[in-house]
């Protein structure tokens, strides 16, 4: 085994003058803190899932688990900054995890349309999940292919990461574009609902979950913008080589995006399942926490 292979497969402390795949040594504290934060949120979501039996909310549990794996990989990298397995572990999972959170947001918007009425939306409620999850899946496949290509090259001496990076950029730009369309549709829904006075006409009980969805979507969207710019700059760009941006614009944003639903859980404010798209309003009230 060559010295380079030993460096990438073993666990070695940082060597001055020898670059890591990150461009820095990941923070141990950040890795541990985010593992704890996502761990707490995931445990609470699991408990809430068991109590409410709103099974689609399992997307928050799955996304949280994937985030934990990713941040555990970064904690591992803080001790073994050259280990390629740890690097691949975190880069793949932290790209995938937000997709589960966006899936939850897609479902929530669909449920809210059932509550406020079909006239408040351009699309049928069921189409949001199918259309935008399909777009996310396509984006993930493209990013995974590009990430695999780039990660192999970044671990080589004088490796050419351009083809892989360009492929990843194409995938994440497509994802940002599809999310931008979703954001536009969500804004259109809010505008139509407000114009019809529905937020003041007995639908006030939906305001907490509507606010939570908006905050979560904003965090996910900001994170997507950041990751897009980061990849466009390349593997030696300013954003990707300074961890504070990743901590603030990826880790923190995702904690908020999933954590808000621990405090304002969808099962307490939304219909349990989809109904036929008749255009009739569904009345909702916060559910009692006691079970008969």
Image: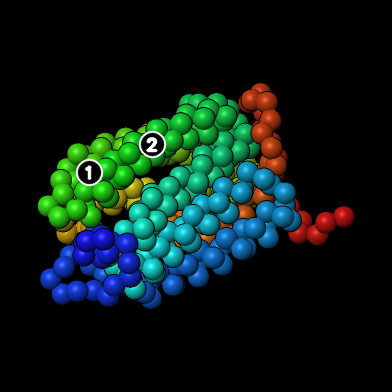
Relative to residue 60, is residue 123 depicted above or below?
A: above
The structure residue drawn at horizontal position 69% and vertical position 37%, both measured from the top left corner, is 273
The residue at which mark 1 appears reads as 165
Q: Which residue occupies the foreground of this view, 150 or 61?
A: 150
Q: Horizontal placement of 229 versus 56: left or right? A: left
User: x, y (%) of residue 101?
Assistant: 49, 48
Corner quadrant of residue 87 = bottom left
The structure residue drawn at horizontal position 50% and vertical position 46%, both measured from the top left corner, is 100
Instruction: Decide which of tag 2 and tag 1 comes sooner along the chain.
Output: 2
The structure residue drawn at horizontal position 63% and vertical position 43%, both measured from the top left corner, is 56
Q: Which residue occupies the foreground of this view, 122 or 194?
A: 122
Q: In which quarter of the image is the N terminus?
A: bottom left
Q: Horizontal placement of 94 versus 163: left or right? A: right
For label 1, the SS is: helix
The residue at which mark 2 appears reads as 141
For label 2, the SS is: helix
């Amino acid at each position: 085994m060559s010295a380079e292979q030993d460096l990438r497969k073993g666990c070695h402390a940082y060597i001055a003058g020898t670059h890591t795949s990150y461009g820095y040594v990941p923070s141990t504290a950040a890795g541990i803190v985010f593992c704890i934060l996502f761990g707490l949120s995931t445990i609470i979501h699991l408990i809430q899932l068991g109590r409410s039996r709103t099974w689609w909310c399992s997307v928050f549990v799955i996304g949280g688990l994937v985030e934990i794996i990713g941040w555990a990989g970064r904690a591992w990298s803080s001790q073994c900054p050259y280990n390629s397995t740890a690097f691949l572990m975190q880069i793949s999972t932290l790209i995938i995890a937000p997709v589960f959170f966006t899936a939850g947001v897609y479902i929530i918007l669909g449920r809210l349309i059932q509550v406020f009425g079909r006239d408040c939306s351009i699309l049928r409620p069921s189409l949001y999940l199918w259309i935008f999850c399909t777009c996310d899946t396509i984006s993930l496949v493209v990013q995974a292919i590009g990430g695999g290509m780039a990660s192999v090259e970044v671990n080589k001496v004088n490796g050419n990461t351009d083809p892989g990076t360009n492929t990843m950029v194409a995938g994440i730009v497509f994802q940002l574009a599809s999310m931008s369309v979703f954001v536009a549709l969500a804004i259109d829904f809010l505008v139509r609902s407000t114009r019809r006075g529905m937020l003041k006409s007995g639908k006030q009980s939906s305001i907490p979950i509507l606010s939570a969805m908006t905050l979560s979507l904003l965090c996910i969207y900001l994170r997507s913008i950041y990751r897009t710019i980061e990849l466009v700059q390349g593997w030696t760009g300013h954003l990707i080589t300074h961890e504070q941006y990743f901590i603030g614009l990826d880790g923190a944003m995702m904690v908020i995006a999933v954590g808000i639903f621990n405090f304002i859980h969808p099962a307490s404010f939304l219909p349990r399942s989809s109904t036929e798209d008749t255009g009739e309003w569904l009345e909702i009230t916060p559910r009692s926490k006691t079970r008969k």
